[in-house]
Image (cartoon, helix red, strand yellow):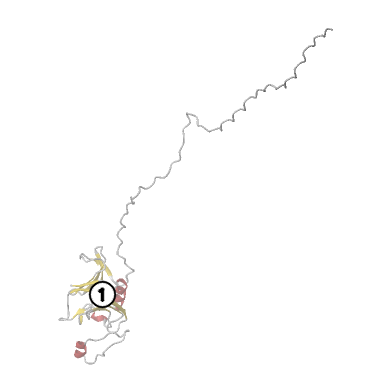
Amino acid sequence: MRLASLAPEPSPAAPLIPAPIPVAPAPAAPAPATSVPAPDAPVRVAALPPEPLPGVDAPRLAPPPVPVALPALRRGKVVGYPGAQAAGTIVVDTAARLLYLVRGDGTAIRYRVAVGRPGTTWKGVQTVTAKQEWPQWTPTPEMRRSRPGLPRTVAGGPRNPLGARALYLGSTLYRIHGTTDPRSIGRAASAGCFRMLNEDVIELYRFVPVGTKVQVI
């Protein structure tokens, strides 16, 4: 008996692996837009204020000269004065019996004064060391010897021989002061001091500080 040849059995089928599907690459992210000026467009820059150079100070201008102050005058007379004394100096012209307050601009304020009697006059330079309103008067021993009735002191007031104001000169006994005897102004009538009318010395007192130079010629 012939056996029919059998067809070979197929081998088990191998698992099918699907072919890879091509994937398109992701599109690249677009670059951020930048504002680029057109080639022909000018670039404008704001102007800045100039900076000072380091270590260089601005030049300082000297202030203009201050004119000599002249409060309202009621008594003194402004006159031309050619002397070389500095502004603010008091000059007493003994021979002319005049007192000048120099202004420094070629003028001075002039007042009439009484000066010392013969033998009591003096010349020199002093400084106003004190000022006093309605000053007390203390006669010197020489005065009391020549006039025995004089008191040791006289309180300030209308009857005081020094008058309404006094400017004390240095450490001396001499003063520029007022008077109770207006008829003596313009004369050689004092013991070496310089008398002024009370109205005049009150005005001069306002203008003159302690430390003022006084030149007697």
Q: Can you identify the residue that label 1 sits on?
A: 128
Where is residue 126 drawn, in percent x and y? 21, 74
Characterize the local packing of mark 1: few (<14), some (14-19) or many (20 or more) Cα atoms within 10 angstroms.
Answer: many
Q: Which residue is at the far top? A: 2
Tell me where residue 109 sits by quadrant. Answer: bottom left
Q: Quadrant of residue 71?
A: bottom left
Left or right, 119 with reference to 10: left
- Is any part of residue 196 visible from this angle? no
View extreme (front): residue: 1
Residue at image location 26% in from the left, 76% down from the top:
129
| Residue 126 visible within the image | yes
**Image quarter in which the C terminus is found:** bottom left
Picture quadrant where residue 83 is located? bottom left
Q: Residue at x 26, y 74 (%)?
A: 128
Image location (x, y in percent) of residue 184: 23, 81
Residue 46: where, in percent of width, then height?
A: 45, 40
Indicate the amino acid at tag 1: Val
